[in-house]
Image (cartoon, rainbow, N blue to C red):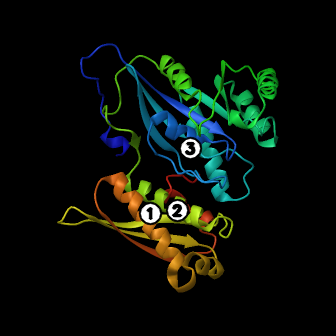
């Protein structure tokens, strides 16, 4: 569902409500997508072991008491090297600028590395109030966590600090409650049962992209994307989906296809099963692989991912 369909909503029974936006920012692989899924209680964003898998801003919606929290899962903030990178970083900062609350997520093992120092410098430039969430706390000794929290708060005046494990859910409920308490008073913007504001075509593309990354691991670089070209509702209630996987070289196309087309067949099967479960109707998925050099610098491709080239 897109923004155009959003209406002012009130929970059943009425009462005083609050509603606002929370931007999750952080370096690549800090765990933002995993945290987003935990906060909402459902899978919204793709999660892989590869960094920089989130490209566009995805809105997810959670309810906490009378508060509706609209989370903006932003791309990881890193030093850009190409047009796609620049637009991803711009989208991340734009998401933070538009939010009522900003949460900086930092991996416990990462600490004050170059990426995180760069992000904190960005916060300093804007003077934005931010909550610090230290993630993956199960990977670091307790005394190290306390020192890291002290170092980070000495570097920037965070309003609050939370220790969490997004993967295991530790501390996530407390963070969600704190965010709910910071939402401004006002009516809900989405229906009570809506958990995401993203077109189904985009969500289906993201699901296939996740399966692509999970299947190929390090064999395929980031020079790939997935676009849903056709979405046809059938009379029997099923949907026919045609997607194109764009790569930059013929050698990458061969990797995606695999021997006798076995790799793309398995990617398609995994994606089809999850898309069917997600949309609640049978999906017939057809995947095609096309070579398009420097697609990451193509404004039209960037717009298809929800980014707005400047």
Quick one: 158 or 164, which is closer to the camera?
164
Viewed as shown, does residue 139 lie left or right of 62?
right
Inter-mark Cα distance, 2 to 3: 15 Å
CB within 8 Å, label 1 to label 2: yes
- Judging by the rendered image, the residue that carries numbered circle 3 is 33
At x 61%, y 68%, the residue is 216
Q: CA distance from mark 1 to mark 2?
A: 6 Å
Residue at x 30%, y 13% (from the top left corner)? 15
Q: What percent of the width, then of the height, locates residue 44? A: 46, 45
Measured along the vertical axis of the image, is residue 248 above or below residue 51? below
The quarter of the picture where residue 129 lies is top right
Q: Give the percent coordinates (x, y) of residue 160.
A: 65, 19
Q: In the rendered image, which residue does mark 2 sit on?
A: 211
185 lies left or right of 146: left
Residue 221 is situated, as x and y percent measured from the top left of the image, at 67, 66
**Which residue is label 1 attached to?**
271
Q: Residues within 10 Å of mark 1 (few under 14, many from 20)?
A: many
Q: Is residue 187 above or below residue 107?
A: above
Q: Is residue 53 above or below residue 10?
A: below
Q: Earlier in the sequence, mark 2 or mark 3?
A: 3
Q: In the rendered picture of this protein, how many numbered marks are placed on residues? A: 3
Given the current orientation, which residue lies at the most extreme bottom position? Answer: 260
Q: Is residue 23 above or below residue 154?
A: below
The CA distance from mark 3 to mark 1 is: 18 Å
């Amino acid at each position: 569902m897109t923004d155009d369909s959003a209406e002012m909503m009130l929970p059943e029974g009425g009462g005083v409500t609050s509603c606002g936006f929370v931007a999750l920012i952080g370096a690549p692989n800090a765990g933002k997508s995993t945290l987003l899924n935990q906060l909402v209680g459902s899978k919204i964003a793709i999660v892989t072991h590869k960094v920089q898998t989130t490209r566009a801003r995805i809105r997810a919606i959670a309810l906490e008491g009378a508060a509706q929290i609209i989370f903006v899962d932003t791309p990881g903030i890193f030093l850009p090297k190409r047009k796609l990178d620049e637009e991803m970083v711009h989208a991340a900062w734009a998401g933070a600028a538009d939010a009522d609350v900003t949460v900086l997520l930092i991996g416990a093992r990462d600490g004050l590395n170059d990426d995180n120092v760069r992000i904190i410098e960005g916060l300093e430039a804007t003077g934005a109030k931010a909550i610090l969430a230290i993630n993956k706390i199960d990977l670091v000794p307790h005394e190290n966590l306390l020192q890291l929290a002290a170092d980070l708060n000495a570097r920037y005046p965070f309003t609050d600090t939370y220790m969490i494990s997004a993967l295991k859910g530790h501390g996530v409920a407390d963070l969600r409650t704190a965010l709910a308490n910071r939402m401004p008073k006002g009516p809900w913007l989405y229906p009570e049962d809506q958990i995401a504001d993203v077109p189904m075509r985009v969500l289906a593309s993201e699901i296939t992209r996740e399966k692509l990354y999970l299947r190929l691991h390090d064999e395929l670089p980031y020079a790939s994307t997935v676009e849903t070209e056709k979405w046809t509702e059938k009379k029997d209630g099923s949907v026919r989906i045609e997607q194109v996987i764009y790569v930059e070289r013929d050698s990458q196309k061969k990797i995606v296809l695999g021997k006798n087309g076995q790799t793309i067949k398995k990617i398609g099967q995994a994606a089809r099963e999850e898309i069917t479960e997600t949309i609640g109707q049978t999906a017939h998925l057809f995947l095609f692989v096309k070579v398009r050099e420097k697609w990451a610098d193509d404004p039209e491709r960037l717009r298809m991912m929800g980014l707005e080239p400047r």
